[in-house]
Image (spheres, rainbow, N blue to C red):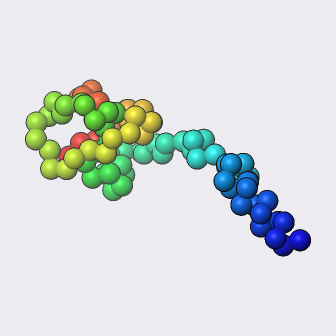
Amino acid sequence: MKKKLAAALAVALFIGIPLGYGNVAEAKAKTYKNCTELNKDYKGGVARSASVKNKGGKTKYKPYVSQELYDANKKSDRDKDLIACER
């Protein structure tokens, strides 16, 4: 009985049958209250894509790239250069 259960579990994991742990893609990006809170997790801010250029000049830290996280915190991008809370 144990061998059959172990074999069935191995096959399920191999072919990717979901086992009820939820879908990672369903997680929503965190919305921060202000730049101080966002910069605690992402020192350089959050860029919408890797190809954006900073309008404000040189920054101390490189921004984290995430379209979903940027879109959730778009209100914090005061200079509209597609990098929220850059430092």
- Number of numbered callouts drawn: 0
Q: Position of residue 38 (x, y in %)?
A: 36, 49
- Reply above or below: 42 against 65: below
Asked whether 21 or 15 is in front, the reply is 15
Q: Position of residue 79 (x, y in %)?
A: 23, 29
Q: Position of residue 32 (x, y in %)?
A: 42, 45
View extreme (top): residue: 80
Q: What residue is drawn where x is 63% and y is 46%?
A: 23
Residue 63: quarter of image: top left
- Reply above or below: 45 against 75: below
User: Taking 9 as reference, is 64 left or right?
Assistant: left
Q: Position of residue 13 (x, y in %)?
A: 68, 55
Q: What residue is drawn where x is 73% and y is 55%?
A: 11
- Does residue 42 show up? yes
Asked whether 22 or 3 is in front, the reply is 3
Q: What residue is drawn where x is 42% and y is 45%?
A: 33
- Does residue 73 show up? no
Residue 56: quarter of image: top left
View extreme (bottom): residue: 2
View extreme (left): residue: 58
Image quarter where the N terminus lies is: bottom right
